[in-house]
Image (tube, rainbow, N blue to C red):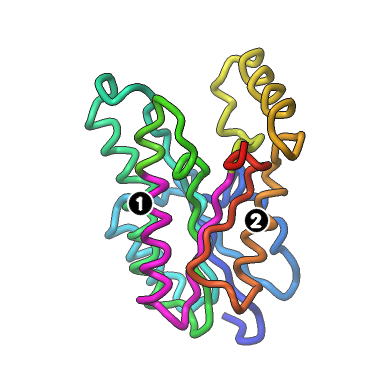
Amino acid sequence: MSQDKTSYVILGGTSGIGAAVAKQLENSENIIHVASRQTGLDISDEKSVHAYFESIGAFDHLIITAGSAAPAGKVVDVKIPDAKAAFDIKFWGSINAAKHASRYIKPNGTITLTTGMLSRKVIANTYTKTAINAALEATTKVLAKELSPIRVNAVSPGLTMTTAYQGMDEQNRESMYENARNTLPAGRVGTAEDVAQAYVMAITNPYMTGSIIDVDGGALIN
Protein backbone atom coordinates (compact mmCIF):
# COMPACT_ATOMS: atom_id res chain seq x y z
CA MET A 1 0.00 0.00 0.00
CA SER A 2 1.32 3.40 -0.95
CA GLN A 3 2.66 5.33 2.03
CA ASP A 4 1.72 8.74 0.63
CA LYS A 5 -1.96 8.01 0.12
CA THR A 6 -4.78 8.07 2.66
CA SER A 7 -6.67 4.79 2.94
CA TYR A 8 -10.33 4.36 3.85
CA VAL A 9 -12.51 1.36 4.61
CA ILE A 10 -16.26 1.89 4.12
CA LEU A 11 -18.51 -0.89 5.42
CA GLY A 12 -21.89 -0.56 3.76
CA GLY A 13 -20.28 1.41 0.97
CA THR A 14 -21.91 -0.23 -2.02
CA SER A 15 -25.18 1.71 -1.79
CA GLY A 16 -26.96 4.65 -0.18
CA ILE A 17 -25.06 6.87 2.22
CA GLY A 18 -21.95 4.68 2.18
CA ALA A 19 -21.68 4.90 -1.60
CA ALA A 20 -22.11 8.68 -1.39
CA VAL A 21 -19.27 8.88 1.15
CA ALA A 22 -17.06 6.80 -1.15
CA LYS A 23 -17.82 9.13 -4.06
CA GLN A 24 -16.98 12.24 -2.04
CA LEU A 25 -13.66 10.74 -0.93
CA GLU A 26 -12.74 9.48 -4.38
CA ASN A 27 -9.61 11.12 -5.77
CA SER A 28 -6.10 10.19 -6.81
CA GLU A 29 -4.74 10.75 -3.29
CA ASN A 30 -7.03 8.23 -1.62
CA ILE A 31 -7.32 4.46 -1.55
CA ILE A 32 -10.88 3.34 -0.83
CA HIS A 33 -11.90 -0.18 0.22
CA VAL A 34 -15.63 -0.84 0.07
CA ALA A 35 -17.34 -3.85 1.60
CA SER A 36 -20.92 -4.88 2.35
CA ARG A 37 -23.22 -7.86 2.23
CA GLN A 38 -23.21 -7.39 -1.54
CA THR A 39 -19.47 -8.06 -1.59
CA GLY A 40 -19.79 -11.01 0.79
CA LEU A 41 -18.94 -9.42 4.16
CA ASP A 42 -21.36 -10.09 7.03
CA ILE A 43 -20.35 -7.66 9.77
CA SER A 44 -22.34 -9.63 12.34
CA ASP A 45 -19.86 -12.49 11.85
CA GLU A 46 -16.86 -11.58 14.01
CA LYS A 47 -14.52 -14.12 12.40
CA SER A 48 -15.28 -12.75 8.95
CA VAL A 49 -14.71 -9.19 10.14
CA HIS A 50 -11.39 -10.16 11.73
CA ALA A 51 -10.25 -11.85 8.52
CA TYR A 52 -11.33 -8.89 6.42
CA PHE A 53 -9.27 -6.34 8.33
CA GLU A 54 -6.34 -8.72 8.48
CA SER A 55 -6.45 -8.82 4.68
CA ILE A 56 -6.55 -5.01 4.44
CA GLY A 57 -3.68 -4.34 6.85
CA ALA A 58 -2.80 -0.83 8.07
CA PHE A 59 -5.16 1.95 6.99
CA ASP A 60 -6.31 5.41 8.10
CA HIS A 61 -10.07 5.74 8.38
CA LEU A 62 -13.04 3.44 9.00
CA ILE A 63 -16.58 4.46 8.07
CA ILE A 64 -19.47 2.17 9.01
CA THR A 65 -22.78 2.84 7.29
CA ALA A 66 -24.04 -0.75 7.24
CA GLY A 67 -27.51 -0.97 8.74
CA SER A 68 -30.25 -3.46 9.43
CA ALA A 69 -33.96 -3.76 8.73
CA ALA A 70 -35.14 -3.31 12.31
CA PRO A 71 -38.68 -4.52 12.96
CA ALA A 72 -41.29 -1.85 13.64
CA GLY A 73 -44.23 -2.22 15.98
CA LYS A 74 -45.28 -2.07 19.60
CA VAL A 75 -43.19 -3.88 22.19
CA VAL A 76 -46.03 -6.37 22.70
CA ASP A 77 -46.03 -7.24 18.99
CA VAL A 78 -42.39 -7.27 17.87
CA LYS A 79 -40.81 -10.71 17.91
CA ILE A 80 -37.74 -10.66 20.14
CA PRO A 81 -35.65 -12.84 17.76
CA ASP A 82 -36.29 -10.27 15.00
CA ALA A 83 -35.18 -7.43 17.28
CA LYS A 84 -32.07 -9.38 18.31
CA ALA A 85 -31.21 -10.06 14.66
CA ALA A 86 -31.33 -6.32 13.93
CA PHE A 87 -29.03 -5.67 16.91
CA ASP A 88 -26.62 -8.34 15.67
CA ILE A 89 -26.13 -6.52 12.38
CA LYS A 90 -26.10 -2.82 13.19
CA PHE A 91 -24.94 -2.68 16.83
CA TRP A 92 -22.80 -5.79 17.24
CA GLY A 93 -21.64 -5.53 13.64
CA SER A 94 -20.36 -2.02 14.32
CA ILE A 95 -18.64 -3.25 17.48
CA ASN A 96 -17.03 -6.12 15.57
CA ALA A 97 -15.72 -3.64 13.02
CA ALA A 98 -14.41 -1.15 15.59
CA LYS A 99 -12.78 -3.92 17.64
CA HIS A 100 -10.84 -5.50 14.80
CA ALA A 101 -10.22 -2.39 12.70
CA SER A 102 -8.70 -0.48 15.62
CA ARG A 103 -5.73 -2.86 15.57
CA TYR A 104 -4.89 -1.71 12.05
CA ILE A 105 -5.90 1.97 12.06
CA LYS A 106 -2.90 4.26 11.98
CA PRO A 107 -2.33 6.78 14.82
CA ASN A 108 -4.64 9.80 14.49
CA GLY A 109 -6.96 7.83 12.23
CA THR A 110 -10.72 7.79 12.69
CA ILE A 111 -13.75 5.58 13.12
CA THR A 112 -17.12 7.04 12.12
CA LEU A 113 -20.25 5.11 13.07
CA THR A 114 -23.83 5.60 11.91
CA THR A 115 -26.77 5.96 14.27
CA GLY A 116 -30.08 7.70 13.51
CA MET A 117 -32.45 10.35 14.79
CA LEU A 118 -34.66 7.74 16.49
CA SER A 119 -32.02 7.47 19.20
CA ARG A 120 -33.45 10.70 20.61
CA LYS A 121 -36.71 11.23 18.70
CA VAL A 122 -39.57 9.58 20.56
CA ILE A 123 -41.87 7.88 18.06
CA ALA A 124 -44.19 5.01 18.90
CA ASN A 125 -43.58 1.60 17.31
CA THR A 126 -39.85 2.18 16.79
CA TYR A 127 -38.33 0.87 20.02
CA THR A 128 -35.91 -1.50 18.25
CA LYS A 129 -34.34 1.22 16.12
CA THR A 130 -34.36 3.60 19.09
CA ALA A 131 -32.52 1.10 21.27
CA ILE A 132 -29.93 0.22 18.61
CA ASN A 133 -29.13 3.82 17.76
CA ALA A 134 -29.07 4.99 21.38
CA ALA A 135 -26.71 2.16 22.28
CA LEU A 136 -24.39 3.10 19.42
CA GLU A 137 -24.35 6.76 20.44
CA ALA A 138 -23.45 5.92 24.02
CA THR A 139 -20.77 3.49 22.85
CA THR A 140 -19.30 6.08 20.47
CA LYS A 141 -18.27 8.21 23.43
CA VAL A 142 -16.77 5.26 25.29
CA LEU A 143 -14.77 4.20 22.25
CA ALA A 144 -13.51 7.76 21.77
CA LYS A 145 -11.91 7.53 25.23
CA GLU A 146 -10.69 3.96 24.93
CA LEU A 147 -9.18 4.16 21.45
CA SER A 148 -7.54 7.61 21.58
CA PRO A 149 -5.59 8.88 19.62
CA ILE A 150 -7.96 7.28 17.12
CA ARG A 151 -10.90 9.68 16.92
CA VAL A 152 -14.37 8.12 17.10
CA ASN A 153 -17.55 9.93 16.07
CA ALA A 154 -21.03 9.06 14.83
CA VAL A 155 -23.32 10.56 12.22
CA SER A 156 -27.04 10.53 13.00
CA PRO A 157 -29.10 10.91 9.81
CA GLY A 158 -32.75 11.76 9.63
CA LEU A 159 -35.07 10.78 6.79
CA THR A 160 -32.87 10.44 3.71
CA MET A 161 -33.83 9.58 0.14
CA THR A 162 -31.95 6.34 -0.46
CA THR A 163 -32.62 2.84 -1.75
CA ALA A 164 -33.51 1.85 1.82
CA TYR A 165 -37.10 2.85 0.99
CA GLN A 166 -37.34 1.05 -2.35
CA GLY A 167 -39.47 -1.65 -0.80
CA MET A 168 -42.23 0.81 0.04
CA ASP A 169 -45.21 1.40 -2.18
CA GLU A 170 -44.27 4.35 -4.41
CA GLN A 171 -47.29 6.43 -3.45
CA ASN A 172 -46.66 5.90 0.27
CA ARG A 173 -42.98 6.70 -0.14
CA GLU A 174 -43.68 9.95 -1.98
CA SER A 175 -46.32 10.88 0.60
CA MET A 176 -43.74 10.35 3.35
CA TYR A 177 -41.23 12.57 1.56
CA GLU A 178 -43.82 15.27 0.90
CA ASN A 179 -44.91 15.29 4.54
CA ALA A 180 -41.29 15.72 5.57
CA ARG A 181 -40.80 18.62 3.15
CA ASN A 182 -43.83 20.34 4.63
CA THR A 183 -42.94 19.81 8.29
CA LEU A 184 -39.15 19.78 8.67
CA PRO A 185 -37.55 23.15 9.51
CA ALA A 186 -35.12 22.64 6.60
CA GLY A 187 -38.06 22.41 4.22
CA ARG A 188 -36.61 19.47 2.30
CA VAL A 189 -35.73 15.80 2.54
CA GLY A 190 -32.07 14.92 2.85
CA THR A 191 -30.07 13.14 0.19
CA ALA A 192 -27.25 10.65 0.65
CA GLU A 193 -24.89 13.37 -0.56
CA ASP A 194 -26.09 15.75 2.17
CA VAL A 195 -25.38 13.18 4.87
CA ALA A 196 -22.05 12.12 3.36
CA GLN A 197 -20.66 15.59 4.02
CA ALA A 198 -20.94 14.94 7.77
CA TYR A 199 -18.68 11.88 7.53
CA VAL A 200 -16.08 13.90 5.67
CA MET A 201 -16.22 16.54 8.41
CA ALA A 202 -15.79 13.93 11.14
CA ILE A 203 -12.77 12.52 9.34
CA THR A 204 -11.08 15.82 8.52
CA ASN A 205 -11.71 17.86 11.68
CA PRO A 206 -8.85 16.95 14.06
CA TYR A 207 -10.59 18.50 17.08
CA MET A 208 -13.68 16.31 16.84
CA THR A 209 -14.05 13.07 18.79
CA GLY A 210 -16.86 11.53 20.82
CA SER A 211 -19.30 13.67 18.83
CA ILE A 212 -22.74 12.81 17.46
CA ILE A 213 -23.39 14.77 14.28
CA ASP A 214 -27.09 15.29 13.56
CA VAL A 215 -28.01 15.64 9.88
CA ASP A 216 -31.78 15.45 10.03
CA GLY A 217 -33.28 18.63 8.57
CA GLY A 218 -34.22 19.76 12.07
CA ALA A 219 -36.26 16.66 12.95
CA LEU A 220 -35.05 16.61 16.55
CA ILE A 221 -36.29 20.14 17.17
CA ASN A 222 -39.54 19.66 15.27
**In the image, which is nearer the foreground, mark 2 or mark 1?**
1
Number of marks in the image? 2
Within 10 angstroms of label 2, few (less than 14), some, or many (20 or more) residues? many
Above or below — where is 118 with respect to 23? above
Q: Mark 2 and mark 1: span between their CA atoms?
A: 23 Å
Decide which of tag 2 and tag 1 comes sooner along the chain.
2
At label 2, the amino acid type is Val
Q: What element carries label 1?
A: helix
Within 10 angstroms of label 1, few (less than 14), some, or many (20 or more) residues? some
Q: Does the magenta stretch include residue 211?
A: no
Q: Quick check: 32 left or right of 43?
A: right
Out of 186 and 175, give the one closest to the viewer: 186
Residue located 61% across and 41% down the image: 221
The residue to which callout 1 is attached is 135
* Residue 158 coordinates in the image, percent (x, y): 59, 41
Question: Which quarter of the figure is the N terminus placed in?
Answer: bottom right
Residue located 64% across and 74% down the image: 205
Q: Which residue lies most toward the front here?
A: 221
Q: Which mark is residue 21?
A: 2
At label 1, the amino acid type is Ala
Q: Quick check: 28 left or right of 204?
A: right
Residue located 62% across and 60% down the image: 199
Identify the magenta region.
132-157
